[in-house]
Image (spheres, rainbow, N blue to C red):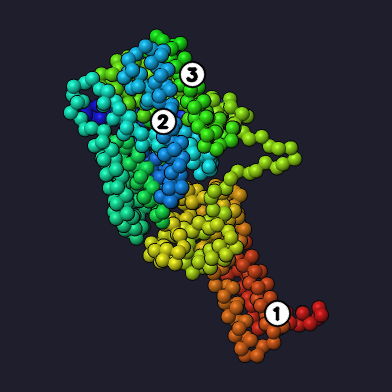
Amino acid sequence: MEHAADGSMLVDAVPMLGFALFFVLLFRRLGLGATLGFLVAGALVGPHVLRLVGDAEGKMGIAELGIALLLFLVGLELSPSRLWRMRRDIFGLGLLQVALCGIAIAAIVWAVTGSTLAAALALGLPMGLSSTAQVLPLLQSAGRLRTPFGERAFAILLFQDLSIVPLITIVAALSRNPADQGGPPGWLLGLYTVGAIVGLVVAGRFLLRPLFRLIGNLDEREMFVFAGLLTVIASAAVMEALGLSAALGAFIAGVMLADSPFRHEIEADVEPFRAILLGLFFVAVGMTLDLHAIAERPFFVAGMALALIAAKAALIMGLGLLFGMKTRGAFALGVLLSQGGEFGFVLFAQAQKALLIEPQAASVFSAIVTVSMATTPFLMMATRRLRAEPVKAGATPDGPRQEGANAVVVGYGRFGQTVSQMLIAQGIPVTIIDRDVEMIETAGSFGMKVYYGDGTRIDLLRQAGAAEAELIMFCQDGDVMDTEVVEGVHAAFPHASIFVRAYDRRSVMKLNGAPLSGVVREVLESAIVMARRAMDAVGVDGAEIDRTEAEYRRTDLARLKAQKETGDIYAGRDGMFSQAAAAAAAVQDRGDG
């Protein structure tokens, strides 16, 4: 309490954020990725080098919320049906990876250190797990999370999260600490897991969705931020209170909302917190890196880190081949998942409390895990050519796989419905966004999937797939678009063609100079159609109707051009369409004929 009260938390934040910003920018500039920059920043500001910041363990406890937020956002990408489709990779490939890598590394530890079998298992099994916090951002930044390769990598990571319960059970069963003998047995932990998962599923269906529907009706963005964070923290806290994986609880909450129309809004609101906290997590990991332990046994730490990476890469590559992957893809999977993971720190602490390992051993093997995590960006760079599939002679290499929508339609009123349905009829995938909860529910009753959100927000458009979209169409009712909004959208998604529904002439004037592919005044075309039918009903000749429409369009465009140039709604008033103008046009046409 004194630590927080004297303002030192704010003082600590300055060097942590400052060093992190500098080294992330530097390492990204060098092509080494953000994770290594965070780790180096943490090592420098931590208690073993500059000693600018202390209490690394306490800060890691807070920053671990970043992992929970990461798993929550991944869960939002995976509907239950998609998870069911991945079940073979999760419970087949994932199970074999955790078991084989954990046993192999435990055997290496036992052979190299001469420790007891219980200690070797307590150290080796956790190192069979990889870093979810490091691998998933790598897949996301490369645009591969939703590809078959990314799904396989994620299936392994997901089973690793599930394996926390049996690994904790194994450590408890091997414990030499009398205080642990009264702890819950493994079968009870398993029941806790199943019960917690079922409880989160029920809560997602009967509590979360109605809650977000209520907030959507209120149209308060701040409430979405609060509700999103509450969902993550509450689900993670429930699992942690039961001694289970907090990140797994957050993931399940995300899956329960994956089919919700509020998915993109939640995703856009939570994402900034995920990025900040996940960065702070890696800074905290760097702070815990015991450089004295490495300095005392540098060859042992380097050798064990190398053995860890080599063993996991080889075994995971073999499993990838066994599950039908091509050689280069299996090799890439092995390299990507070759490091130790953040859950190793948690399990080492459990093993230390169980009196299976000494504190010095926990420190040394935590350093080994951290070093292995730091090598991943270098390994990915060094193996880039080996991982890339060769292009056959004369063949054109495939472009990036576009998983997102080809069109994003903002607004699903009468106008947006027509636009969306005509695009869908041509086989164009469409993502639809609207802010009217009642409209979203009505559309759902007709089988249309509409997502809740403000479609003028760049972050929400990005979550909805605008970066891969060929079309972005603003079909909202009212006068909501202007040049500044359109320029922002165009700057963020320069490859998309942007179309805007304009309310009236003033709306069109507000869009003057905007980088648009088209503007449609909402009532112009329908009014012209009605005028044509009215003239036909009173016997006007068809050619005369066509000539009248053409002249109206010509004079209307001329007036609109003058109005846009001057910004004056009265500009071009003398050129308004009239009977005299129509007669003059008819004479002109006859003269030309």
What residue did someone put label 2 on? 98
First along the sequence among labels 2 and 1: 2
> In terms of sequence position, does the residue under pointer 3 or pointer 2 come before the other?
2
Element assignment for label 2: helix
- Measured in 3D between alpha carbons, the distance from the residue under mark 3 to the one under mark 2, in whole angstroms, is 19 Å
Decide which of 82, 141 is in the foreground and name it: 82
**Badge 3 is on which residue?**
306
**Residue 546 visible in image:** yes
Closer to us: mark 3 or mark 2?
Answer: 2
For label 3, count other residues whose C-alpha is less than 10 Å away and answer few (under 14), some (14-19) or many (20+).
Answer: some
Asked which secondary structure carries label 3, the reply is: helix
Question: Looking at the image, which is closer to me, 149 or 91?
Answer: 91
Q: Residue at x 27, y 23 (%)?
A: 174
Q: Mark 3 and mark 2 in contact? Answer it, CB < 8 Å.
A: no
Please report the residue visible at 67 percent of the width from the left and 41 percent of the height from the top. 397
Amino acid at circle 1: Arg
Give the mark nearest the N terminus, 3 or 1.
Answer: 3
Instruction: Say which residue label 1 marks.
Output: 547
Q: Position of residue 558 (x, y in %)?
A: 66, 69
Which of the image's four quarters has the N terminus?
Answer: top left
Quadrant hosting residue 328: top right
Answer above or below: position of 587 versus 319. below
- Residue 178 picture quarter: top left
Query: x%, y% of residue 34?
Result: 48, 30
Distance of mark 3 from mark 1, alpha carbons?
Answer: 81 Å
The amino acid pointed to by label 2 is Val
How far, Cα to Cα, is label 2 from label 1? Answer: 76 Å
Residue type marked 3 = Leu
Decide which of 529, 58 is in the foreground and name it. 58
